[in-house]
Image (cartoon, rainbow, N blue to C red):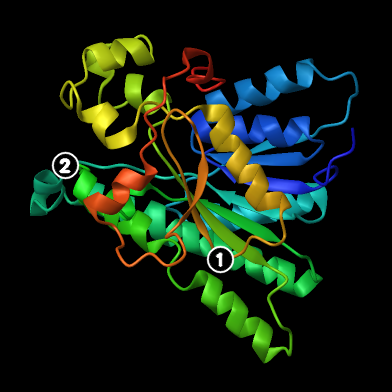
Amino acid sequence: MSSSLQGKVCIVTGGAEGIGRAIGERLLSMGARVMIGDIQQEAAEKFINEYHKTQSTAEVSAIFQKTDITSVDDCRQLIKATVDRFGKFDVLVANAGFSGDPFLQEVDSDIDVSWMRGMQGNLIGTMLLSRLALAHWTRNNIRGAIVITSSIAGYFPSIGHPCMSYAVSKAAQMANLHFVLEKAAKEKGLTESPIRCNAIMPGAVWTGIWHKGRHAASNFKDPEDFLSRNPFGNDYFDKMNGGWTPMNKLVDAYIKCIEDESIRGSCFIVNGAAGEMRLYPEEGSTEVGGSLEWEKYVSREKRDPENWAGSVAK
């Protein structure tokens, strides 16, 4: 079956594991060629090698460029390496990011590296890659698409997040980018920009951050084990997040934003067991970021264990 992504070139940052890997796998399955930009070289190369072993042709559809998105040089090299290999690119999935230390530790003057790294990676690195993509597409008359991995933490501070720089940087990611694109279009006499940018705000998805990162010492084996020993409290997870968000449903939302040219300048929440893709804020909403509004986005349907992990534990 043909796909609108057949032959398209997509950059996915943070594509070695977790959400980024799942997006990369889906894009490849739809005939796209994928550049993985990630700081985790071993994991990225393992993913790419595993993928190519399943293919019947010698064509290289997935490649890797070691990239630390806090580095301006690395961001520029990622774009250059993609164009050098494939001649162009059509899609940027700005997925890589960082979660730092809890707030009171973050603002301690002796350990402010975590704060700066979070802001540099989540906000500045994402914006730099977006600017580089805009420049490439504008020069080459390409109808490009950017999808940013934002976070519910940036829009609903009432649900709580221990890392202030994470919440602040995620909230800022989408600021003005859509409006800049539309302003640029009008200056060229167009009714709308040929370049689109949207953001996805995932709920809690079972990825390495839960069993490798700050919770590694707890040695959580799977999502059910995490819930049974939830470090945030017995009812916090279901109350705040509505259970785990299925990875396949989350990836569906990214693909929708990439393929559907009518979607532009929008943020979507994909949260809870149903994994429903919902526009945020909803049309006519008078409250933004409050706990009452959050209740509308919490899905408490029965969790489906088969959809929890997907490919993310690899």
Residue in front for this viewpoint, 76 or 103: 103
Residue 235 lies, with reference to residue 168, above or below; the image says above
Q: Which of marks 2 and 1 is nearer the N terminus?
A: 2
Residue 47 visible in the picture: yes
Q: Which residue is drawn at 68% across and 75% down?
A: 193
Secondary structure found at label 1? loop
Task: List x then y, in percent, for residue 90.
Answer: 74, 55
Q: Which quadrant of the structure image shows residue 272?
A: top left
Relative side of 14 to 228, left or right: right
| Residue denoted by label 1 | 265
Q: Distance between the residues labelled 2 and 1?
A: 31 Å
Indicate which disc residue 139 carries.
none
Q: Which part of the image, by quadrant, shows the N terminus?
A: top right
Q: Nearer the viewer, residue 285 or 180?
A: 285
Q: Name the residue under label 2.
A: 102
Kindly tell me whether residue 220 is visible in this rendering. no
Three-letter amino acid code at the position of disc 1: Gly
Q: In this view, does 169 lie to the left or right of 47?
A: left
* Residue 221, x across and y down, in percent: 35, 9
- Front residue of this view, candidates 93 and 78: 93
Disc 2 crowd rating (10 Å Cα; few below 14, some 14-19, many 20+) is some
The residue sitting at 35% across, 39% down in the picture is 298
Residue type, numbered disc 2: Pro
Give coordinates of residue 192: x percent, y percent: 69, 78
Question: In terms of depth relative to the viewer, which is nearer, 309 or 156?
Answer: 156
Residue at 26 percent across and 42 percent down: it is 100
Residue lying at the far front in this picture: please name it.
Answer: 284
Q: Are marks 2 and 1 in contact (CB under 8 Å)?
A: no
